[in-house]
Amino acid sequence: MKFDLIDLRTFLAVADLGSFRAASEALHLSQSALSRRIDKLEAALGVQLLLRTTRKVELTTVGRGFVPRARNVLNELENALVGIQEVSDRLSGLVSIACVPSAVAYFLPGVVRTFHERYPRIRIRIIDESSSQVLTAVARGEADFGLTYIGVNDADIEFTPLLEEPFVVAVRRDHPLAKQKTVDWADLSAYEYISLAQGSGNRFLIDQALAHGKVRPRHFCEVQHVPALVSMVEAGLGVGVVPRLAMPGAEHASLVSLQLCNPQVTRSLGLIHRRAKELNPVVKLFYDLLVSSAHTR
């Protein structure tokens, strides 16, 4: 049977008020829309619930018997929703997540916002550090789990990949490269280039990808963390290569992400946690939301 809860509400409104007109006003539906709702419910149940005449609406025998059942269904649903809301309101605790800075700017805030709306009493602590420090925080128990991009060889740490993320070219909208859909590494040599510093995990991935190539743009400035590089680009100091999640969406006023080719560079972003320690229920709520959010991107 295919019908919606609003179909039940519509039927009960007509049954209680004895009028399509009164029910349509109470539900803020047009009479034609209300009539379609009733027709849909009757078709789904395979019975006639209402007798319609030009002057009045009456319940059939089946309709009179269905009224208390429909009301019970709605009451049970409302009680269940209230119960869920009460559980959400009562949940409290602390979730500590260690996260690489490049995933904080435009990926993590949406997850934090949704989680806080659902569980307002649970506090969230974000440790935004380099990939090596994220691993250390998780291994030492300073963070419940970590969001990072370099797989680990530690037998005590489990890495769960979330998504494969490409590196992109970050430019201002008024930059000459912004007109191109794709950019080769060779194209970057003609412009002021800002690089990530030696020793950072993202720089390591870029150097690996360029190891066997002849083209390597020469930088005039280098920074330690990706958000700083994005800020330098936004200030008009040059162009840079960063992970896609570190960049704002297409609606941003001044920044554009361009596809990078020859060679492409990617990283595997994922979650790490200690194998021997099971996530507590409050932490698991945030962990699962993070996983589901990543899969929808």
Image (tube, rainbow, N blue to C red):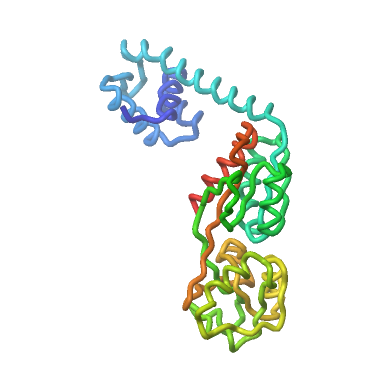
User: Measured from the top left, where is residue 183 in percent x and y?
Assistant: 50, 79
Q: Nearer the viewer, residue 86 or 271?
A: 271
Q: Is residue 142 visible?
A: yes
Reply above or below: 78 against 166: above
User: Measured from the top left, where is residue 165 in percent x and y?
Assistant: 52, 61
Q: Is residue 172 visible?
A: no
Left or right side of 113 for 294: left
Q: Nearer the viewer, residue 34 or 111?
A: 111
The residue sitting at 73% across, 39% down in the picture is 123
Reply above or below: 134 against 177: above
The residue sitting at 70% across, 51% down in the picture is 136
The quadrant of the image that shows the N terminus is top left
User: Measured from the top left, where is residue 110 in percent x and y?
Assistant: 62, 50
The residue sitting at 47% across, 78% down in the picture is 262
Residue 79: which quarter of the image? top right
Residue reaching furthest bottom?
Answer: 190
Q: How many marks?
A: 0
Residue reaching furthest left?
Answer: 46
Q: Nearer the viewer, residue 152 or 66?
A: 152
Left or right side of 61 for 105: right
Q: Nearer the viewer, residue 139 or 296?
A: 139
User: Measured from the top left, where is residue 193 in percent x and y?
Assistant: 65, 81
